[in-house]
Image: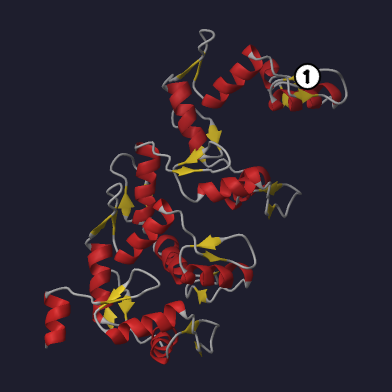
Amino acid sequence: MSRHQISVHKGRKDFACDECEKKFVKKSSLFTHQKLVHKDRENFTCNKYEKKFGNKSNLINHNKISHEVFKDYLCEMCAKRFENKQSLLIHIKIIHEGSRDFACDRHGKKIRKKSHLIDHHRTMHERRNDFSCNKCEKKSVCKSDLLKHQRTVHEGRKDHACDKCEKKFGAVCNLLYYQKTIHEGRKDYACDKCEKKFGQKSDLLEHQRAVHEGRRDFACDKCEKKFGVKSNLPSHQRTAHKGRKDYECSKCEKKFGQKQNLLQHQKTVHEGRKDFACNECKKKFTQKLYLLLHLKTVHESHKDNSCDKCDEKFGKKSDFLNHQRTVHEDHRDFACDKCEQKFGLKGHFIRHQKTVHEGRKDFACDKCEKKFGLKSASN
């Protein structure tokens, strides 16, 4: 009883680890922690895949939960099962009640779990990634993330199969998210500032920070570029600084730095799809972004980008930058290899080659048989 009173009611933890800052109520717990964490003893291995454990009880629990699927505690709100009542209660509190009891003392961010708060401090404020992959340059905050990365990326393992289709996943969380959003069509988290909906609350919060608050919290350490979405930073570093293009189109030789760009290319170029139509005119677009930009600049006449060297205004920032580069700085970076002409814009250069050197006339008059090299000339 005295040990209970000291630990629970007085909150004392008298046994501190001399290798890290963690403290324990019992001396035996300290010894177990040192043996498992700092001596790196992993003598108990799962025979279904290579995950290792520091003691036999953890291995037995792992087998029971992961492979024998004994999960007796059912969440009545989402049908997810848990191996013990404590995990169920934590799940309800965090997921369904939205509790975030742990706040970062540096910028006030609230976090669901204490372990996530510690990881947040290590990665965001201390910039620590202590676990390095021996097969690539990736670094992870915790060992479990490193092992998951090695299993899914380098071993190509996808141990979690969807029971409604043939798709497989390397992580169970990705499987659950896929089933919820694809098969059940659920997007439970709606933005209160626009009509966009999300399958995960974290995606909603990221959207609100980046789009509506304009925050760019993730900065590249090799250039001045900043990103509102964390996943865009490593993607930028891979493609911009390392020059990697890992996604190749199976129908042509074009390569892409991001998978989403490959899928967009296949959908628009090879399938010819334009899924986003303007409800004020008949024009169609390959991406929703282009449709929204069209509505803003054409139908709402928004031109928010003003040139400080002349009176010209632009709806698109890219058009504004191109104007400054070509008109005021006189950049002509695209030279024709068949004549001496130079162009400020790549689109003008390609059009010149097609119409002048290849003699193409792709635009036909719908009232006679005459054809033109430029669409504007056919009107």
Q: Quadrant of residue 179?
A: bottom left
Judge by depth and name the residue closer to the eye, 4 or 17: 17
Q: Quadrant of the C terminus?
A: top right
Given the image, on which type of amino acid does mark 1 rest?
Lys
In the picture provided, is 157 more to the left or to the right than 292? Answer: right
In the picture provided, is 238 more to the left or to the right than 59? Answer: right
Judge by depth and name the residue closer to the eye, 367 or 51: 51
As drawn, the residue found furthest toward the right would be 338
Query: 147 above or below 365?
Result: below
Q: Position of residue 250 (x, y in %)?
A: 72, 55
Q: Quadrant of the N terminus?
A: bottom left
Q: Is residue 29 visible?
A: yes
Q: Position of residue 321 (x, y in %)?
A: 57, 22
Which colour scheme appears in the figure?
A: secondary structure
Q: Position of residue 372 (x, y in %)?
A: 75, 20
Judge by depth and name the residue closer to the eye, 372 or 159: 159
Q: Quadrant of residue 373?
A: top right
As drawn, the residue found furthest toward the front would be 18
Q: Position of residue 129 (x, y in %)?
A: 49, 60
Q: Quadrant of residue 119?
A: bottom left
Query: 323 above or below 155?
Result: above
Residue that appears at 25% across and 71% down? 90
Residue density around tag 1, few if under 14, some if 14–19, many if 20 or more, within 10 Å: some
Query: 173 above or below 37?
Result: above
Is disc 1 placed on a helix, strand or loop?
A: strand
Residue picked out by circle 1:
342
Query: 316 above or below 157?
Result: above
Judge by depth and name the residue closer to the eye, 84 or 168: 84
Residue that appears at 51% across and 30% down? 282
Residue that appears at 11% across and 76% down? 9
